[in-house]
Image (cartoon, rainbow, N blue to C red):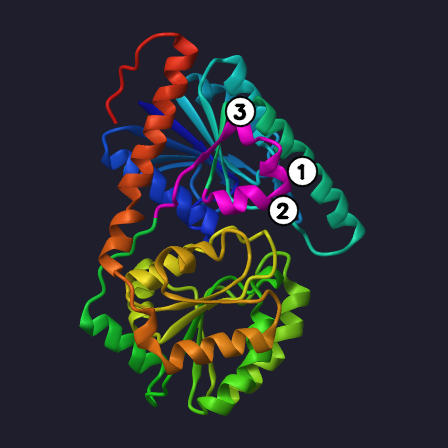
Amino acid sequence: MKILIALTYYRPHTSGLTIYAERLARALVQLGHSVTVLTSQYDKTLPRQEVMDGVQVVRVPVLMRVSKGVIQPTLGIEATRQILAHDVVNLHLPQFDAAGMALRGRLFRRPTVITYHCDVKLPPGWFNRVANFAVHVMDHLAATFAHQIVTYTQDYADHSPYLRRYRHKLTTILPPVTLPPATPEAIRALRERFNPQGRRPVIGMAARLAAEKGVDVLLRALPRILEVFPNALVWYAGPYENVLGEEAYREQVLPIARQFEAQGHWRFLGLLSPEEMAAFYPNLDVLVLPSLNSTESFGLVQIEAMMNGVPVVASNLPGVRQPVRMTGMGEIAEVGDPESLAQAVIRVLQHPERYRGDPEEIRRRFAPENTARAYLQLFERLQQALRGGPSTVNP
């Protein structure tokens, strides 16, 4: 099967959406299918075409940026060519350009599946309100034209204003989660690099420095945690400099984080490679995900932590709370509540034996191959419906 995956940002860009698409594309290739990723050339130094892990990546030139979006005048021509050359289309939303591609998929009778990652909620301001409205309109048009929509969890679908409108098109597929193996030497090297004094406990957070991630909530919760665990250290993994669209938020929270850093309670690790992330989790005593709104729909890092036996404290948000509910490996804190977050972290650190799950079962359940097979079964059903005959593809 020839599969076209379309999204605005692909590797080397890093986000939960990008990581999901990359893992799915790789798994489909490993199952013997041909995969092309159609994306933006958001950085002019990136090649227009290249092969990454068996995946053909096609990047469309960018004329200009509008907030976090991009303007690609030649995307329509390239999308038409690619959709005609493939059997099925998988669009990853939010994506402003998805409506046009979904329409092409419908007109060219190519099964078109949306993977809906999260609702869009840009920061306050008249420009962002206009951008929000435009993205919502285009996403709704994409859903109208698409044949099916994939969501991570039913919990998120039940609470998303967008997804509730398309219940008749929804399919729930758990996201793909995997990490390379970490050697004892790599784990020790990361510990010696970022925690040479051997401080414990280590509280981890892995995210972009963005307002919706709730970094400020963790910063406000930290003094209460330090009352009980005065030697605690936060490891913050992820981009924290020059995060697109988050300049004001960075100016707000960075000085506070720097104060804790000077006291030995906070370390910025920066953007880690997959191999470094594999060594990151075994060094943690707990991972926190204090997200604030529906721009977070699950939190893949929760599963990555749990696969390493690390419990999680997550916000009580639809979808985000599901990993803890599914595994019992952690606590759920109220959204935007530093005291609730602090108390949940303290409970986990005081009684880690209560939050032991089955990491191997979690690995099996979220294996990218399982996610890819679920997509292939969905693609087959849609092909059969469009052709009116029996399926011929073996996933």
What type is the residue that disc 1 sits on?
Answer: His
Residue 146 badge: 3
Q: CA distance from mark 3 to mark 1?
A: 15 Å
Name the residue located 47 percent from the left edge and 19 percent from the top edge. 81
- The span picked out in magenta is 152-176
Give the amino acid type for the residue marked by disc 2 in the picture: Val
Residue 307 % position (x, y): 29, 60
Q: Residue, x 34% and y 38% (percent of image)?
A: 25
Tags 3 and 1 touching, CB below 8 Å: no
Q: Is residue 184 above or below residue 314?
A: below
Asked whether 143 falls inside the magenta stretch, the response is no
| Above or below: residue 210 compared with residue 86 | below
Question: At 60% across and 79% down in the image, what residue appears?
Answer: 220
Label 3 and label 2: CA atoms lie apart by 19 Å
Residue 197 badge: none
Which is nearer the eye, 199 or 47? 199
Q: Residues within 10 Å of mark 2 (few under 14, many from 20)?
A: many
Q: Residue at x 53, y 17 (%)?
A: 106
Q: Label 2, on which residue?
A: 120
Mark positioned earlier in the residue sequence (3 or 2) = 2
How far is disc 2 from disc 1 in space, using C-alphas? 8 Å
Badge 2 vs badge 1, beta-carbon distance below 8 Å: yes
**Residue furthest toward the right?**
126
Residue 143 lies in quadrant? top right
Q: In the displayed structure, does residue 117 sit left or right of residue 125?
A: left
Q: Earlier in the sequence, mark 2 or mark 1?
A: 2
Whether the residues at callouts 3 and 2 have beta carbons within 8 Å, the answer is no
Q: Position of residue 289 (x, y in %)?
A: 49, 65
Q: Secondary structure at mark 2?
A: loop
Q: Which mark is residue 136?
A: 1
Q: Quadrant of the N terminus?
A: top left
